[in-house]
Amino acid sequence: MPAFDLPLPELERHRPALEEPADFDEFWTSTLREAARYVPLASARPVANGLRLTETWDVTFRGFAGDPVRAWFSRPAGVREPLPAVVEYAGYGRGRGLPHERLTWVTAGYAHLLMDNRGQGDRYGSGGDTPDPHATAPGGPGPAVRGLRSPHDHHYRRLITDAVRAVAAVRALPGVAGDRVAAVGNSQGGGLALAVAGLLPDLAAVLVTAPLLCGIRRALDLTDAGPYGEITAYLAVHRGAERAAYRTLAYLEGVSFARRAHAPAHFGVGLRDTVCPPSGAYGAWNRYGELTGTEPRKEIHAYPFNGHEGGDAVHVRRQLFWLATVLGAGPGPA
């Protein structure tokens, strides 16, 4: 795929205008207040994972509306002192899979919680274990369009709430240093991590790669790939629904969450990414923390010849060394 978005010098200055709802903060405050009525951690059961150096627990925590959400929690075997934690969010259509699939963070020395995506898990990977009992509002079959006509009904209202509650759950687990928790994700997971950073002022760090839900209106004009293509396909059938859809999507906009974030931030983006166009990531990065009255530590790494895979393992290596300097764990600075 050739480069198709703004040239890099323009991306580095890109600060998109927003049609932000006046009640954006109240919408999310009330949503999270309702979820906080429930004790976050429901259960944590040790499981055999076939690994000698990693211990794993099958965790259930209470997410949106108190619904049970599944997760894998892993720690380096034999380590008993409190560890910094990484809460990881999976990509679009993926579930938590199997406990041996994602070992990077736990082998780097962190406690690691991998959240299941409610109502997802059937597109690739090894499946998921969390249904979405509220997925009854009008919309298409894909998560991006479930409940698209109302912000109260949309799938991502529930999923973002789950993501925030996952941080509360990991802080309730034994052996976790609750003041040193990072949110991490790629694609949909990156959008969720960014939302968590905007909703939790005490998050210690956020690592965002190729984030979905950033610069949504522009992305709908640039690409028909992935989740954005599902939205345009829905609007192609439901002519005249775009006003309601745009209103809903404004409550999910990652740039709005980025404006409210305090935590040190590490971004990665492929400049030929047609699934999550790079102007979305740069829009969030350029406006990151602007409403907080501070200047959060942040950096971004661009990969000019890569698409949605971004920097892949090269970028993960950068993440490992960066997070070690922020949380004081892992491999240490290069």
Image (cartoon, helix red, strand yellow):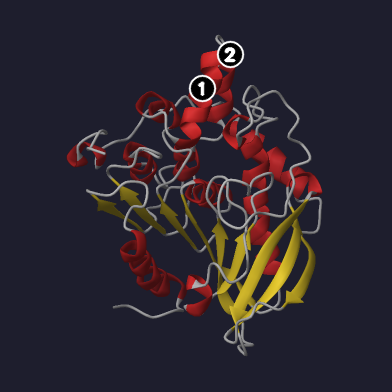
* Residue 202 in view here: no
Judging depth in this view, the residue of 47 and 34 nearest the camera is 47
Q: Position of residue 300 (x, y in %)?
A: 31, 54
Question: Picture coordinates of residue 79 (x, y %)?
Answer: 60, 88
Amino acid type at image mark 2: His
Does residue 285 sit above or below 251 in this rendering? below
- Give the amino acid type for the residue marked by disc 1 in the picture: Ala
Q: Residue at x 27, y 44 (%)?
A: 271
Give left or right: position of 152 versus 286. Answer: right
Q: Residue furthest bottom?
A: 78
**Residue matched to label 1:** 233
Find disc 2 in the rendering and name its residue.
238
Q: Nearer the viewer, residue 152 or 74?
A: 74
- Residue 27, placed above or below residue 186: above
Residue 7 in which image quadrant? top left
Question: Going from the N terminus, do you reach mark 1 or mark 2 first?
Answer: 1
As drawn, the label of residue 165 is none
Q: Is the residue marked by circle 1 packed among few (<14), some (14-19), or many (20+) residues within 10 Å? A: some
- Report whether 209 appears left or right of 120: left
Q: Residue at x 33, y 52 (%)?
A: 310
What residue appears at the point 57 percent right and 34 percent down from the top-left corner? 144
Instruction: Check disc 1 and report its element: helix, strand or loop.
Output: helix
Mark 2 surroundings within 10 Å by alpha-carbon count, few (fewer than 14), some (14 through 19), many (20 or more): few
Quadrant where the C terminus lies?
Answer: bottom left
Residue in the foreground of this view, choosing between 130 and 87? 130
Coordinates of residue 118 in the picture (x, y in percent): 68, 47
Residue furthest to the top in view is 240
Side (left or right) of 324 relative to 243: left
